[in-house]
Each structure stands twice: as C-alpha cells, then as structure tokens.
Amino acid sequence: MTPTIRHRPPPLAPSPARRLLLAALAASAAALPLPRPALAQHWPDKPIRMVVPYPPGGPTDIVARVVGQKLGERLGQPVVVENKPGAGGNIGAEAVAKAAPDGYTLLVATTAHAINMTLFRKPGYDTARDFTALSLLTRGPLVLVTAPTTPASNVAELIALAKAKPGQVSFASSGNGQSTHLAAELFNTMAGVRMTHVPYKGSAPALTDVIGGQATVMFDTMLSAMPFVRDGKLKALAITGARRSPAAPDIPTIAEAGLAGYEATAWNALLAPAGTPPAVVDTLSRALRVVLEDGDVRARFATQGFAAEWMPPDAASRFVSAEIDKWARVAKASGATID
C-alpha cells in the first residue's frame, strides 16, 4: 500500500489579544527581582562606602585610606572613606550595622569594637551578631611611653613606682574603651598596680600631656608615639606585642622586660552588615587578599608599626570572637564600665 502522507497545517498566527497577553507576561517576568546570587554577579556597580568610626588623620583612618584606594582599583569602583566618629567608635559601627546588607557599606573595625561589647552597657550593636567579618587588615603592638623626666626607664621601675605611689601614677588614653585604655588596664591587673586612667579625645592631646608631665605614661600606637620618641620628647619603655617590632627592634616587649605573659595588640578589620550575600563576601575577601599581599601596602604599614594581615572570613570571625572574650575578661577584672 502506498503510505498516506498527512500534511500538518501551518500554525495559526497568534491573535492580537494573544500577542498582548504574551507581551504582558514577558514584561512581568522581567520585572521580578533576580535571586541574590544573580544580583551579586554584577556587584559592585556603584561606589562603596567605607565607614571609619574615628576622626580623620588617626591610625585607623590611614589604614582605611590605603586599603580603600587599592580595593577600589581592584573592584573597579571607588571606595569612599567616610569618617563617622563618636562614642568610642559606637556611632559609626551602629550606622553600618543598620545599613542594607548589600556590600556597599562597610566598617573599619578596631580592637575597641571587641572591647565595647563589655565596657559599654548599651553600645547600640553586637559586634559578633550584627556583622560579617571579611578579613583582618592590620595588627600591631602598642608602645609604652613616658616623659624623659619620669623616674622610670623600664617596666620594672614603672611597676615599682606605681606600687610606691598607688593611684598617683596615671595613664593617658585616646578615649574610653580604646586599645590604649584596656592595654593599660591589663597591665594594672597583671602587675598588681593601680595607675589612674585619664581619657582624652584622641592620641594627640593625650601624648601632649604625657610629654608635659600631666599624665605619667601612655600605651599608644607606634604610628602616633614613635615620632616623639625619635625626637627625644618621649622615652619608650616597652612594646606590648609578643615579639619585638621590626619597626623598633631595640625596644623590648613588656613580657621580656619583666611581666611574663603580657600581650596586647591593636588591630583593624573590615566588616560588612550581617546578611551580606555570600557571593559579595567572597568577592570582597578575594580582593582584600590581593590588596593586603601587595608589597607596597605591606611596606607602608610596616614603617608605621603595623603588619598587613589577610584572613578568610571564617577565620576573621573567630579572631573577632576571641578578642571579645579576651577583653571582656580584662574589663571585668579591672571593673571598668561605661554607661
């Protein structure tokens, strides 16, 4: 038999009404929000804001501007540093904690943001709960300095002086809750002395009064204090790290100068609001690694007493949590609190 060939009729052209319906459905689909991973593929497509919760010109501001410039070059978008000081770093931190978790608002956190969890009754945020850690940025020791006229030229002599005059030996700090405050409280606790805290609004006025003898000593960043040491306006008794600093190898650590086990470091980390998409966190983390391993960046920080230090986000989160626990013990032992 000859097979029967059936011809399928050509499809009917859609009616005008059907064409309108299909166009409407296509427009609706295009208007639906993309899933977060798809959005993150195009991140960043506008400038990023990096909040420094301290005034311009200080150590944290300097770190932020160096990292921000390099990070912007790496990501292809400007990174704008915004100074938002106040309340020991709490005002800027709270603002970032409440910002949209989209990767466009970041916080340059410091040791104070671990300390403040215990020291302040109501800081306005929770460092562990309200942020996603991206990486550490820098870490470095403080330096213990005093005026050349102070009758103590090393740690042992300072401890003896503080024990001979309880409450009369004072220590300046750059503000309540800063690493410059709690490093001294740790010294008080471990040495069994009672130096009196005199807080200032920043390192500059605090160091001025130490030079003038209005305050006896200060634990300050090497960036702020070492120029005065080199000029002979201050003398350095020790540094607070576990090892001597390459930036000042002739200055002993507090531990080797007589207070075994003492260690306090100042650090900066970059945090994003909690809930930031994982793809954005990964992009920032990989970009930060390149920035912090750049030879020029590392050399610039080294001359200021800092070590550039990249950490993956999970390690950075564990580091911040450990710092919160460490400084909570110090704050409780010293009895220091701020309303």
Image (tube, rainbow, N blue to C red):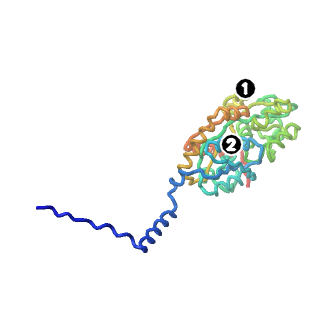
Camera-side residue of 98 and 120: 98
Q: Residues within 10 Å of mark 1 (few under 14, many from 20)?
A: few
**Kind of residue sitting beneath label 2:** Gln
Q: Is residue 185 visible?
A: no
Q: Name which residue lies at 62% across and 42% down.
A: 74
Please tell me whether mark 2 or mark 1 is closer to you in this view.
2
Task: Pick the quarter of the image with the C terminus.
Answer: bottom right
Q: Is residue 148 visible?
A: yes
Question: Secondary structure under badge 1?
Answer: loop
Tell me: residue 123, above or below residue 174: below
Mark sitting on residue 69 = 2
Question: Secondary structure under badge 2?
Answer: helix
Camera-side residue of 38 and 234: 38
Q: Which residue is mark 1?
A: 249
Q: Position of residue 193 (x, y in %)?
A: 76, 38
Q: Position of residue 92 (x, y in %)?
A: 70, 53
Q: Position of residue 70 (x, y in %)?
A: 66, 41
**Kind of residue sitting beneath label 1:** Pro
Sequence order check, earlier mark of 2 and 1: 2
Q: Name which residue lies at 52% across and 64% down.
A: 31
- Judge from the rendering whether residue 38 lies leftward or rightward of residue 253; answer left or right: left
Camera-side residue of 83 and 144: 83
Q: Residues within 10 Å of mark 2 (few under 14, many from 20)?
A: some
Q: Name which residue lies at 68% across and 31% down.
A: 260
